[in-house]
Image: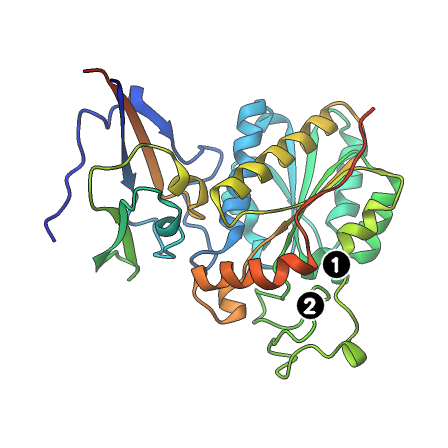
Amino acid sequence: MAEFKTNPEIVQPENLVYKRTDLLTPKALSYCPGCGHGTAHRIIMEVLEEMDIQDKTIGIAPVGCSVLAYEFMNIDMQQAAHGRAPALATAVKRLMPDKFIFTYQGDGDLAAIGTAETIHACNRGENIVIIFVNNGIYGMTGGQMAPTTLPGMKSSTSPYGRDVHTMGNPLRITELVAQLPGTIYVTRQAVHTPSAVRKAKKAVRKAFENQKLNKGLSFIEIVSNCNSGWKMTPLKSNEWMVENMFPYYPLGDIKVNEE
Amino acid sequence: MAKVKGEIIVDTERCKGCEVCIPVCPEEVIAMAKQVNRKGYHFAQPTNDLCTGCTNCAVVCPDGAITVYRKKFTE
């Protein structure tokens, strides 16, 4: 195959239509190839850049795969103890009400160890944005079963599949917090196709707009793949996610309070 | 008729070879290189000049490795 040469007439600064946002640091992301975390990071940073609030935003990094989020997001960040990101976000927002605060959490962080913090922050209706990346597994520690693991899904601690009789049912925490009066906007999105990414970005934008208007807590779940934990190729894991995750975790807005 | 042509530049050292960009390209421009980058990943590269600059590949790229250019040519 002859090497393809790019056309220098097109590759000019005035023709640029898309480039990696400068709000992501030049560091290589520590995520596995094909992981949805990278895309989720990027859409948040693009929204901050479009709204021009990067100097007024404080992110709360979780514990999990995205524990090093502060290394990649070129904004002010705080690191919370495992699961306590909504509690820390509450403190930061109350001390600095003019700042934009968001937490970025995985399912092991938000839906397992941090369930209490999540539910109470949502119930109090703190004026923050919670980004919840759900891949149905503890990715960082080696693919153990999480509360969001699907029935029958194999993980390193449920090698015969999750048995709902002994291990309980998967937790749909997004539907749970949608019932609380404190939440203003609850939605579930994905980042596996271009259209899904664009929709997710709109949702993130809406969440930050809500915070700008002091409306209340916005909760965005992003259903993602974990190709390493699921032991699949990135493309296969995206297919598997569409076939298995989406029936249990359907995409779309769950609660939109327009006032 | 005006014709829109695009061009993608892949940051080959940033690419991790996940291949997510390949099925989303409507013009089937992207393929994986036989060579590997310094980390040992086969990186994505454009193989023809059919690109329209739709940015689909760049939008799904988890590592933000793709930069897209687009130009309108009037004949």
Chain holding disc 2: A
Classify residue A223 as left or right of residue B42. Answer: right
The residue indicated by pointer 1 is A111
Give me the disc on residue A67: none
Instruction: State whether discs 1 and 2 lie on one chain.
Output: yes
**Measured along the vertical axis of the image, is residue A186 above or below residue B73?**
below
Give the percent coordinates (x, y) of residue A47: 57, 31
Relative to the observer, which residue lies in front, A29 or B54?
B54
Residue wearing tag 2? A146
Q: Residue at image x 52%, y 52%?
A: A36
Image quarter of residue A9: top left
Q: Where in the figure is residue A204, as x and y percent of width and height?
A: 63, 36
Q: Is residue A73 visible?
A: no
| Disc 1 from disc 2: Cα separation | 8 Å
Circle 2 packing at 10 Å, graded few (<14), some (14-19), many (20+), is many
Asked if the residue under mark 2 is in contact with the one under mark 1, i.e. CB atoms within 8 Å, the reply is: yes
In what element is the residue under mark 2? Answer: loop
- Provide the secondary structure element on which disc 1 rests: helix
As drawn, which residue projects farthest toward the front? Answer: B1
Residue, x 20% and y 37% (percent of image)?
B49
Does residue A213 lie above or below A146 as drawn? above
Q: Is A45 left, or right, of B15 in this rendering?
A: right
Q: Chain of mark 1?
A: A
Q: Please name the colour scheme applied to the rendered image.
A: rainbow
Name which residue type carries label 2.
Answer: Ala
- Give me the residue at 45% from left, 33% from top: A21
> What is the crowding at mark 1: few (fewer than 14 residues within 10 Å), some, or many (at least 20)?
many
Task: Report the quarter where the C terminus of chain A lies.
Answer: top right
Residue at the location (38% across, 57% down)?
A: B18
Q: Is residue A97 above or below residue A154?
A: above
Q: Tell me which amino acid carries mark 1.
A: Ala
Q: Position of residue A92 (x, y in %)?
A: 75, 37
